[in-house]
Amino acid sequence: MPLYPSSLIYVVDDDPAVLHSTCFLFESAGHRVTAFASGEALLTAFPGPSPAFVLLDQVMPGMDGIEVFARLRNLDARVPVVLITGHPNPSIRTRAHAVGISLVEKPLALEELSGLIAAARNYPGAAMIG
């Protein structure tokens, strides 16, 4: 049983294997998931169906996750966002902190993903766009 049965979750990652496995984890927990292979593809979905949560990769060709987050803000998209990275380094952490977005390292476990959704819904604070 999903934490929020009607939740639509957007997952953005340029690595097809990570994208597939992350979507599978959410779907196996009963969530509806829409996958995007780039930040640009995600941005074309706004305005549109309102996701409950966006899991956004940081390191991608073209716009990185923090740039995509800034564009979502400019679109006034009201959705909790968590940034994920397989390349944690101090500069990414500093940039994420500066814009007020949570940063989580890959690989992710289902329990961790469920916790992120719950935290984003209960304490949207800085991770909330809008």
Image: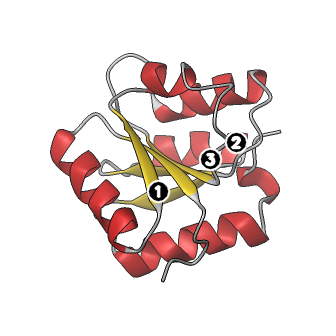
Q: Earlier in the sequence, mark 1 or mark 2?
A: 1
Estimate the x, y position of residue 36 in percent, counting from the top left: 38, 34
The residue tagged with tag 3: helix, strand or loop? loop
- Kindly identify the residue that appears in the image at 38 percent across and 60 percent down: 105
Q: CA distance from mark 3 to mark 1?
A: 9 Å
Do the residues under discs 1 and 2 have CB atoms within 8 angstroms? no
Q: Earlier in the sequence, mark 2 or mark 3?
A: 3
- Taking depth in this image into account, of 57 and 10 the one nearest to the observer is 10
Residue 98's disc is 2
Q: CA distance from mark 1 to mark 2?
A: 31 Å
- Kindly identify the residue that appears in the image at 56 percent across and 68 percent down: 116
Do the residues under discs 2 and 3 have CB atoms within 8 angstroms? no
Q: Quadrant of the C terminus?
A: top right
Q: Earlier in the sequence, mark 3 or mark 1?
A: 1
For mark 1, what is the residue?
Answer: 32
The residue tagged with tag 2: helix, strand or loop? helix
Q: Residues within 10 Å of mark 2 (few under 14, many from 20)?
A: few
Q: Residues within 10 Å of mark 3 (few under 14, many from 20)?
A: some
Q: Nearer the viewer, mark 2 or mark 3?
A: 3
- Kindly identify the residue that appears in the image at 77 percent across and 41 percent down: 78
Q: Amino acid at mark 2?
A: Ala
Q: Amino acid at mark 3?
A: Pro
Estimate the x, y position of residue 102 in percent, counting from the top left: 60, 56
Q: Residue 122 falls in which quadrant of the image?
A: bottom right
Q: CA distance from mark 2 to mark 3?
A: 24 Å
Residue 51's disc is 3
The residue tagged with tag 1: helix, strand or loop? strand
Q: Is residue 107 above or below residue 129?
A: below
Q: Amino acid at mark 1?
A: Arg
